[in-house]
Structure formats: structure tokens, C-alpha cells
Amino acid sequence: LTTVALNSKNLNLMRSLGLNAVFIPNGIEIRHVDNKILTSVLNKFKVRKESFIFSVGRLADSQKGFSLAIKAMPKILEKYPNIQYIIAGEGRDRKMYEKLIKELGLEGKVRLIGFVSDEEKLALMKASLAFVQPSYFETFGIVTLEALSQGAIVLVSKNNGSIDIIKDGKNGFFVDLDPEDIANKVIEIAKMN
């Protein structure tokens, strides 16, 4: 009997327990976003290429942690006042995010754009300054793979869903579950552009 582990961390644990275990990483279909689609999506959401950071997922903060990136925005805006934060998705915490955005005076700078199509999601990943996924928990980061497939600079928290995808400093960066660290990494990326 062979058991399939969700990630390499679980694989090591299973093997230490004497189980015959293997790790089979998830994969994605790589899709090309052409310039016509890219331009159309940027026009629809009224953003310019590399002028925004982007996140996508269910609006459930206890898992996705988007509030951490929202709280990072005031520091980012001190250095780069034209950067926006675009969050795609729907969920139970939408009202909480709207309240936080208002409390921090970030209306127009942090935008909740709701559900997007796969094509729009990939185009926004491709055009973003950085793809930010500060999740508290992920089983496997499919959206992280999708962002990498579009050439996005990826900032993710170090969780079970990202440890087998991101090689810190090589194909992306790990961020602490802390607005200050997220802000500092986005500012460093903005300096490179």
C-alpha cells in the first residue's frame, strides 16, 4: 500500500512513521495570454502594466490573509503612490475587507474586483508588478503555479502549499505573515522596475 503525500513536508512525516509514501506534485495547463487579451483586460479594470500588485482567491481572511497585504499598502504608497492592490474573488469576508480599506483610507488604491474569468486572472497575473498570496494555509498553490507560468514575480507565505513550488530568491520570494515584510518586499520589487 502506497500513500500519496500533499507536499514534501508531509512526505517526510509519513516516511518517518514507516509509511510507504510518495509525493506527486500538482500541475497546470500552461496558457499563453496574447497582447490583445492583455490590453483588453487592463482596459476593463483600468490599470496599467506593472502598476499594481494582484491577489486572487476566496475572500476568507483566516485562510488567504489578504488583510495583511491591505495593511501593507500605506507603507507601499509612501514610496510608490501610484501602485494599486487588486484582489479578485468573492467570499464571506468582503464586507470586512471593504471596512478595512475605508478605515485605512485606501479607497481607489485597494480594489475588490470580484470574480474574474481564467483568462482575466492570467492576464492580471502577467501584467502585475507582483502576485501576492499571503495565505495562512494552502494545501497546494495552484494560483502560485499559474502566476509563475505568466512570468509574475511571486510573493507567498511559507506554507504547505508553497514550499514545494517556490525556491526563495530564485523563482519567487517568501513573505512573513506581516504587513511590514510584505510592504518591504513589494517596495524592493518596485525599485527594480
Image: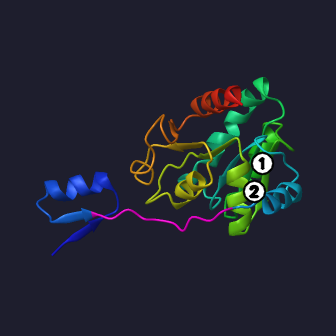
| SS category of the residue bearing label 1 | helix
Q: Quadrant of the N terminus?
A: bottom left
Q: Residue at x 62, y 59 (%)?
A: 57
C-beta proximity under 8 Å, tags 1 and 2: yes
Q: Which residues are magenta?
A: 23-32
Is 135 left or right of 77, judged from the image as shown?
A: left
Q: Which mark is residue 95?
A: 2
Q: Residue 114: image x %, image y %? A: 76, 63
Q: Quadrant of the C terminus?
A: top right
Q: Which mark is residue 135?
A: none
Check residue 30 for magenta coloring: yes
Q: Given the current orientation, which residue lies at the most extreme left position?
A: 18
Q: CA distance from mark 1 to mark 2?
A: 6 Å
Q: Residue 18: image x %, image y %? A: 11, 60
| SS category of the residue bearing label 2 | helix
Q: Check disc 1 and report the residue beneath it.
A: 99
Q: Residue at x 54, y 54 (%)?
A: 144
